[in-house]
Amino acid sequence: MNVCILGAGAIGGYITARLSQQGCHVNLIARGETLTQLQQHGIGLIEDNQPVQYFPVNAVAQASDLPPQDLVIIAVKEPALAGLVPQLRHLVKPHTRIVTAMNGIPWWFGAGLPGGAALHLEPLDPHHHLSALMPAEQVIGCVLHMACTCPTPGVIQHKMGNRMILGEALGGPSAALDGIANLLTGAGFDASTTDHIHKDIWFKLWGNMSHNPISALTRATTDQIIADPLTRQLSEDIMAEAQQVGTRIGCQLDTTPACRNQETLKLGAFKTSMLQDVEAGKTLEINALLGAFCNLAQQLGIETPFATTVLGLVRLLDRQLL
């Protein structure tokens, strides 16, 4: 099997290292110092405070250096995805399966909603390039419950978590889905499958869509957001709007926003990914975490004043960071 990972950062590197450790030949597209390190040493992995271990990887600068792939795992943040379309055109053919190991709502989400409601999410795929190149029939969604960092180029440190939930974008079981789950299980991941990956995406989104933008705007960790009664209420108001939309699309949530905040408190003084991007001066992952939600709600005729207001604020912040 030809396997290519798009994304040489923390998550993409971790998946690469685990697969390579189990003897899988993995192709990885990288650039700059990361590419040099990968070509000279392989992918480095630090686990359980042990010394770094290196595993072989075929690192290239361009997708045109590779043949079409059987499996492509996309492990980049949403703002980077559109720029990868030229690379993907070389890698993805009709037989290719694509796994989206990404945060938030993916571009294909509307195609697999129950009831046959095919909704196009404009903020994620404004020119339909992604959906044309990677139709939902070829896509497997993936929800990640893990945390990794990239302390130096080409070296990944695993912090916590090992869970991956996978499901066909259009729902239901498939032999391909089982095969990919088995591949990842063999690499040491706690990989499971579901017939309705939308529900798992929605549940993880539920906390991220409120805490991430509030933390970016305030520079506060999640425990500080929840400790303040006003920002806690704002986060719960946004989550209540998401509950309403989720019920409409078959992604009911069986807990309350207040209980979700209590679960988040268990993480302690946690910096969201969006806050980390603010501090690093990076483009913010706005559309996958909030913009697509607001667009979906608008198409369904559901008002989301709290989420929409925060979306406007965080978009302005993002423009100031550029």
Image (spheres, rainbow, N blue to C red):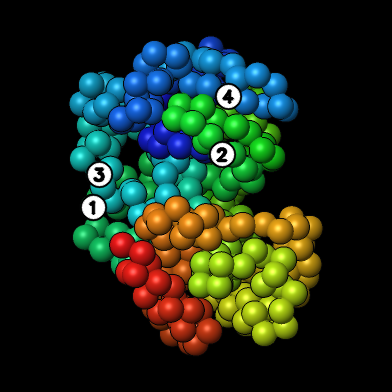
Q: Residues within 10 Å of mark 4 (few under 14, many from 20)?
A: many
Which label lies toward us, 2 or 1? 2
Q: Is residue 42 left or right of residue 48?
A: left
> In the displayed structure, would residue 48 be above or below residue 130?
above
Task: Give the residue pinned by disc 2.
Answer: 149
Q: Residues within 10 Å of mark 3 (few under 14, many from 20)?
A: some
Q: Amino acid at mark 4?
A: Leu
Q: Amino acid at mark 2?
A: Thr
Q: Amino acid at mark 3?
A: Val
Circle 3 — which element?
helix
Circle 4 — which element?
strand
Q: CA distance from mark 4 to mark 1?
A: 34 Å
Circle 1 — which element?
helix
- Mark found first going from the N terminus, 4 or 3: 4
Q: CA distance from mark 2 to mark 3?
A: 25 Å
Task: Give the residue pinned by disc 1.
Answer: 129
Along the viewing direction, whichever of 126 and 172 lies nearer the viewer: 126
Which label lies toward us, 3 or 1? 3
Task: Give the residue pinned by disc 3.
Answer: 85
- Mark found first going from the N terminus, 2 or 3: 3
Give the label on residue 45, or none. Answer: 4
- Mark found first going from the N terminus, 2 or 1: 1
